[in-house]
């Protein structure tokens, strides 16, 4: 038995089997389309000066951790944040003092379940989902044992503060790590 390899674990959008649009990843059935690791920041659209000027708030997305291996279980699957989010001024390239915050939480449907659909990206998922900002495996969000060909839903919550400078036009960057134990 060769065991699980990184290629056997995929992050996929929610929003229906044929959904390709990250803005529609608001729960529901797992998509057949993968979230590419180098484009995690693409899950959330750019926050423009109108959104930021309206005050602090949150945006939500639902993705799935999918075990595409034919036989092996993704044991004790744990997700944590490996990159901190920062506002980057698009004109100057200089980080501002205000930070975006990314938080993650397991959907209550559990392994093999279908995440409930939210009304829009500003609506928190039902449950309630418990959001944290873990940065190590030991503090990560444990999704349990994901059998071959199965999945577990994970919610992401992007929080932003009120910005004094509405022209900051921030970009947001974050990364997720997925680790498991060997049985």
Image (tube, rainbow, N blue to C red):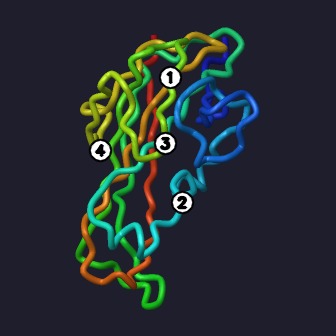
| Location of residue 56 (image quadrant) | bottom left
Dot 2 or dot 4: first in sequence order is 2
Q: Which mark is residue 45?
A: 2
Residue where numbered disc 4 is placed: 135
Dot 4 or dot 1: first in sequence order is 1
- Taking 70 as reference, is 26 left or right? left
Dot 2 or dot 3: first in sequence order is 2
Residue furthest to the right: 18
Residue in the image at 55% along x and 51% along y: 43
Task: State how far apart marks 3 and 1 are (Cα).
Answer: 14 Å
Residue in the image at 47% along x and 33% along y: 118
Residue in the image at 67% along x and 9% along y: 71
Task: State how far apart marks 2 and 3 are (Cα).
Answer: 13 Å
Label 3 close to label 1 by CB (< 8 Å): no
Count of marks placed on residues: 4
Task: State how far apart marks 3 and 4 are (Cα).
Answer: 28 Å
Front one among 11 and 18: 18
Which type of secondary structure does the marked residue at label 4 adopt? loop
Q: Nearer the viewer, mark 2 or mark 3?
A: 3
| Location of residue 33 (image quadrant) | top right
Q: Nearer the viewer, mark 3 or mark 4?
A: 3
Residue where numbered disc 1 is placed: 115
Residue 165: image location, x then y, percent: 30, 84
- Position of the N terminus by quadrant: top right
Q: Which mark is residue 120?
A: 3
Which type of secondary structure does the marked residue at label 2 adopt? loop
Residue in the image at 53% along x and 30% along y: 27
């Amino acid at each position: 038995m060769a065991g699980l390899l990184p290629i056997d674990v995929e992050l996929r959008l929610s929003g229906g089997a044929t959904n390709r649009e990250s803005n529609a990843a608001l729960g529901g059935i797992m998509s057949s389309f993968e979230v590419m690791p180098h484009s995690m920041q693409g899950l959330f659209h750019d926050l423009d000066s109108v959104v930021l000027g309206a005050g602090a708030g949150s945006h939500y997305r639902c993705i799935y951790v999918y075990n595409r291996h034919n036989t092996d279980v993704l044991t004790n699957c744990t997700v944590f944040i490996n990159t901190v989010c920062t506002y980057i001024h698009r004109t100057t390239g200089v980080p501002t003092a205000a930070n975006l915050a990314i938080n993650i939480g397991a959907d209550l449907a559990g392994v093999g379940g279908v995440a409930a659909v939210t009304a829009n990206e500003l609506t928190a998922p039902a449950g309630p989902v418990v959001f944290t900002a873990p940065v190590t495996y030991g503090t990560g969000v444990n999704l349990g044992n994901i059998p071959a060909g199965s999945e577990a839903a994970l919610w992401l919550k992007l929080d932003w503060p009120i910005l004094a400078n509405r022209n900051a036009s921030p970009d947001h960057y974050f990364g997720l790590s997925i680790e498991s134990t060997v049985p």
